[in-house]
Image (cartoon, rainbow, N blue to C red):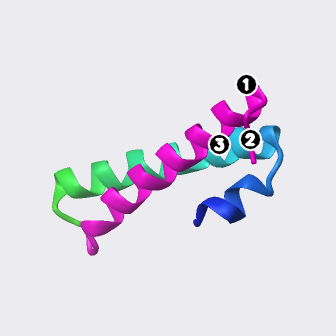
């Protein structure tokens, strides 16, 4: 997801999105540890997406959002 797309979403939806991304990351880490992960680069992409979502949530909570 790109930051402009994320900023259009409300805080509650962002928190749900963060939870979904975290669950997906957990599942990918399990797959990686068992050797069944097809695309290891997906883990890094998910980490960045989670960080983006958390950043936008923080901006909106502080009132400094765009």
What secondary structure prevails in the magenta region? helix
Q: Residue visible at 39% across and 50% down? A: 47
- Expressed as whole percent of the image width and height from the top left, the position of residue 21 reads 54, 50
Q: Which residue does the image show at 28% across and 73% down from the upper left?
A: 39
Q: Which residue was labeled with disc 3?
A: 56
Q: Which image quadrant for residue 45?
A: bottom left
Task: Please identify the quadrant where the N terminus is shown.
Answer: bottom right
Q: Position of residue 43 (x, y in %)?
A: 33, 58
Q: For mark 1, give the secondary structure.
A: helix
Q: Which mark is residue 53?
A: none
* Near-viewer residue (61 or 25): 61
Distance from disc 2 to disc 3, alpha carbons, whole Å, reads 7 Å
Residue to which mark 2 is pinned: 65
Seen in the picture, residue 35 relative to 56 is either above or below; the reply is below
**Residue bearing mark 1:** 62
* Horizontal arrangement in the rendering, residue 60 relative to residue 52 (left or right): right
Q: What is the magenta range?
A: 37-66
């Amino acid at each position: 997801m790109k930051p402009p797309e994320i900023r259009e979403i409300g805080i509650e939806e962002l928190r749900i999105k963060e939870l979904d991304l975290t669950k997906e990351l957990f599942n990918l880490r399990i797959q990686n540890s068992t050797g069944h992960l097809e695309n290891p680069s997906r883990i890094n992409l998910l980490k960045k997406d989670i960080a983006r979502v958390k950043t936008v949530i923080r901006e909106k909570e502080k009132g400094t959002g765009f």
